[in-house]
Amino acid sequence: MTVTDIEPEPEPAQRAGGVASVRIVRVVRETDDAVSLELAPADGHAGRFGYKPGQFLTLRIPSALTGSVSRCYSLSSAPHEEGPLKVTVKRTVEGYGSNWLCDNAVEGMSLDVLPPAGLFTPSTLDTDLLLFGGGSGITPVLSILKSALAQGSGHVTLIYANQHENSIIFAAELAELAAAHPDRLLVLHWLQSVQGLPTVEQLAALAKPWAEREAFVCGPAPFMAAVSAAMTSLGADRKRVHSEKFVSLSGNPFETDSTAVDVEAAAADGETATVEVELDGENHEITWPRKRTLLDVLLAKGLEAPFSCREGACSACVCRVVSGEVTMRRNEVLEDDDLADGYVLACQAIPVTDDVSVTYS
Ligand SMILES: Cc1cc2nc3c(=O)[nH]c(=O)nc-3n(C[C@H](O)[C@H](O)[C@H](O)COP(=O)(O)OP(=O)(O)OC[C@H]3O[C@@H](n4cnc5c(N)ncnc54)[C@H](O)[C@@H]3O)c2cc1C
Ligand code: FES
């Protein structure tokens, strides 16, 4: 079964918004309840899949009930590997999308995806890193870890929590990396079956020698909360502790017809601002109806601005305000230091000043 069995797939040139297509080239059973999907871009789409370690894809998963649901999956591959893109999906109890993928994804199947996005990536690989992974939260963390070892110069410590030994995703790959980089990589495993759930105090004791490092945290919500509290108790600078939340999208960017936003009518109805946008190396000056989000306006103009959730929850649409001011309706993902650096979510941004300039570079 392929996505195209559910709905005919348009030719690449006709695809709406940023939607691209990939083919599953291999399915790897990682553990009893996790699979990796190795993906190759469809012909003509390869140029849309450049990515940074820690970024994610948004997959369109067929549903007989709703046509499709969309779910984000971090890339567990690393950009320098030059092999297929890889996402790793762990079953969520009673979850729809993860179980569909674990049960139905087969070699040769085509999937619609939104290209790589996200802010959970180191600003430099030439620094010492402290990484935390809980269960499937290892996926973006592994990508960062592999990139740092292959392309950076710093030391890496990974604290990796799992329920039991058989549920450790990438156990063999991590052991090989640790053996290949004994002086740069330290992997500390925590097994709930042996040690119980890690407490804030236990995590703080483990992390203490490396608390000054840039930290990246991904895993179940209670694990992330405990790590965050542990790092705070160690006096870590909040700006240096980055986290990625694994949540399901409630909206469906694949089913939203962006071109249906009538920007001209909205502009005629109310006040407008002007926005200058630098996107993919080109500059555009666009009239911005004040009640429309920046992303709506850009997509309606036919520009391929990045996005995924359109709910202010994933950061795929992030851009930076160079001049002027915007406000966001909702922001569940940008932290204070991101805001201080001028980053905003285009899917939530509406203008405050008459003239705004933003860049996606
Ligand atoms: C940036 C990002 C990266 C991610 N990367 C990964 C990754 O690398 N690997 C990975 O495995 N996951 C990843 N995720 C999580 C992934 O996107 C999904 O959230 C996850 O697979 C669960 O989706 P699902 O469709 O199986 O579960 P859902 O169907 O969304 O269900 C999730 C939970 O909600 C409950 N639920 C569902 N519907 C209802 C309802 N109506 N009322 C009450 N409860 C309900 C279910 O019982 C289940 O426990 C990532 C998420 C984000 C945002
Ligand atoms: S598209 Fe997800 S935050 Fe804007």
Image: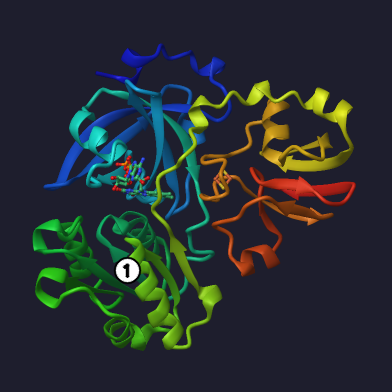
Q: Position of residue 151 (x, y in %)?
A: 41, 61
Q: Ligand 1: does it lie within 8 Å of the C-beta at label 1?
A: no
Observer able to see residue 281: no
Name the quadrant containing residue 149: bottom left
Q: In which quarter of the image is the N terminus?
A: top left
- In the image shown, does 158 or 298 lie closer to the viewer? 298
Viewed as shown, does residue 257 lie left or right of 56? right
Name the quadrant containing residue 64: top left
- Badge 1 element: helix
Q: Position of residue 167 (x, y in %)?
A: 14, 57
Name the quadrant containing residue 73: top left
Q: Tell me the crowding category of disc 1: few under 14, some 14 to 19, or many 20 or more residues within 10 angstroms, Cα based.
A: many
> Residue at coordinates 83% horizontally, 51% vertically from top-left?
352
The type of colouring in the image is rainbow
Viewed as shown, does residue 156 lie left or right of 281? left
* Residue 241 drawn above or below residue 281: below
- In the image shown, does 11 or 134 lie closer to the viewer? 134
- In the image shown, does 139 or 349 lie closer to the viewer? 349
Q: Residue under circle 1?
A: 223
Observer able to see residue 38: yes
Q: Position of residue 318 (x, y in %)?
A: 62, 50
* Residue 129 drawn above or below residue 85: below
* Residue 5 drawn above or below residue 291: above
> Residue at coordinates 42% horizontally, 55% vertically from top-left?
54
Q: Where is residue 336 in the image (x, y as percent from the top left)?
A: 63, 68
> Residue at coordinates 74% horizontally, 23% vertically from top-left?
262
Viewed as shown, does residue 274 lie left or right of 157? right
Query: Residue type at mark 1?
Result: Phe
